Amino acid sequence: MSERGTDNHSEVTDFILVGFRVRSELHILLFLLFLLVYSMILLGNVGMMTIIMTDPRLNTPMYFFLGNLSFIDLFYSSVIAPKAMINFWSESKSISFAGCVTQLFLFALFIVAEAFLLAAMAYDRFIAICNPLLYSVQMTARLCMQLVAGSYLCGSVSSILLTSVTFTLSFCASRAIDHFYCDYRPLQRISCSDLYFLKVVSFFLCSIIILPTIIVIIVSYMYIVSTVLKIRSTEGRKKAFSTCSSHLGVVSVLYGAVIFMYVIPDRFPELSKVASLCYTLVTPMLNPLIYSLRNKDVKEALKKLLKKNPIL
């Protein structure tokens, strides 16, 4: 059996990304939609990183995390969107075996890193609101670096494990991946190997990634809400909640889509594609808008940057 699996595995040199099952006339519309969204992702996230790096007033832990969030959003959307747009015009819609491995590896790395980074951001808001006098003492530059580095490390380890297990499968059933990018669930549908080990690994990874990060976020916000409700002034409550509402919005969209995609049984491939759009394109597009439009410091820094560089 292992010899047969090796033979089948060695024969696969590329895959076909089926994408969205729509009429060919709609491919142009989808291409333009993806192009518009991806352009907004580039503009928003590059702009956010530029503002944070150039304005000294934004040299704080919260903006350090936000800059890394923009970096992650920019890169994992760039792993998906350009290839998807090319395939709207391509007849073959193919992706090489190495390209598929790379796409899954990088996407898994950045999406897991974002989950842990969002948990770190929730902890940062917890310290800022519940222990404001100790904020500068507890949220040191060293701790912030460790939290961000830990996020990337967890992403790397998880991605290496998932990618290596996925691509030890034999793909003899078909070369057509019913998705617009290489993901492990569509890949397992076209495998003729025993999927037990892959399912165990994926369940284990979901458990150690989703559960701990959600627990940190929920507990942090339970303390935050409790503290904010004790604030007597309406203006104080509004200001405290405004700093957290943006983060909660991002978390809700991302985790809602991820749970639907990876926790709920894989029975609706077309709905899975729509859910995938939420965290591959929609969330990276909305993050800079949400954080900038609701953030006075970012808006002031943007105005200052535009005054210095009127050509922008």
Image: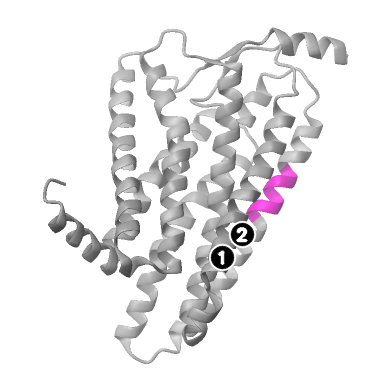
196 versus 208 height, above or below: above
| SS state under label 2 | helix
- The residue at which mark 1 appears reads as 217
What's the distance in space between the residues labelled 2 and 1, CA to CA? 6 Å
236 versus 21 height, above or below: below
The amino acid at mark 2 is: Thr
| SS state under label 1 | helix
What are the residue bounds of the magenta stretch?
Answer: 203-210
Crowdedness near tag 1: few (<14), some (14–19) or many (≥20) residues, C-alpha within 10 Å: many
Q: Residue at x 41, y 89 (%)?
A: 231
Magenta stretch, main secondary structure, is helix
The amino acid at mark 1 is: Ile
Give whichever of 23, 216 is nearer the camera: 216
Residue 287 drawn at (x, y percent): 37, 52
Give whichever of 87, 117 is nearer the camera: 117
Q: Residue at x 64, y 12 (%)?
A: 174
On residue 213, the disc is 2
Contact? badges 2 and 1 (CB < 8 Å): yes
Any magenta on residue 226? Answer: no
Residue 195 drawn at (x, y percent): 77, 28
Give whichever of 38, 142 is nearer the camera: 142
Q: Residue at x 35, y 45 (%)?
A: 285
Residue 83 drawn at (x, y percent): 43, 23
Crowdedness near tag 2: few (<14), some (14–19) or many (≥20) residues, C-alpha within 10 Å: some
Q: Residue at x 81, y 33 (%)?
A: 197
